[in-house]
Amino acid sequence: QVQLVESGGGLVQPGGSLRLSCAASGSIARFNAMGWHRQAPGKQRELVATIDSGNTYYADSVKGRFTISRDNAKNTVYLQMNSLKPEDTAVYHCAARSGYVTTNRNAYNYWGQGTQVTVSS
């Protein structure tokens, strides 16, 4: 059984910052990749950032503003979000891939329940 629990969302003004956390059940080293996705009402789910053993990836919309990182000792992946914009408002989901390697950035086995991020003045 794999559980991913997100936290750190909330209400922030434009230009502000938040750090999201994704706590996994057990070692995150067993995952081939982990990532963050977001989905706003009426919009398609969007891949935000991914991290694997040697690489990170960011959507163009968040490059230079968001940073994905991991702490293996704490079994946790983070998403630092700076210079937030109203269009960043969404439910942010953590995801993990285990058991296979793929070039498909959107292929994940496990998903958290999400944390709400609202950017508004």
Image (spheres, helix red, strand yellow):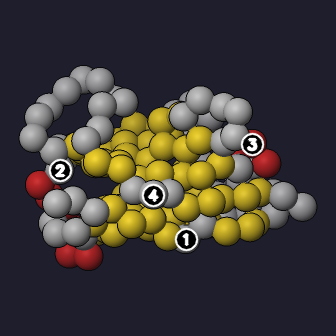
Q: Residue at x 66, y 31 (%)?
A: 43
Between circles 4 and 1, the one closer to the viewer is 4
CA–CA distance in space, label 4 to label 1: 13 Å
Using the image, determine if residue 12 lies above or below residue 82. Answer: below
Residue receiving disc 3: 87
Instruction: Find numbered disc 2 in the image and state the secondary structure of the residue it sits on.
Output: loop
Q: Which residue is drawn at 77% across and 57% down?
A: 119
Q: Which residue lies furthest to the front in this view?
A: 1
Between circles 3 and 4, the one closer to the viewer is 4
Question: Badge 3, how many Cα within 10 Å: few under 14, some, many 20+?
Answer: few
Question: Which mark, residue 113?
Answer: 4
Residue type at mark 2: give it: Phe
CA–CA distance in space, label 3 to label 4: 21 Å
Residue receiving disc 2: 31
Residue receiving disc 1: 8
Q: Which of 72 and 24 is in front in this view?
A: 24
Q: Which residue is drawn at 81% across and 63% down?
A: 13
Q: Residue furthest bottom?
A: 74
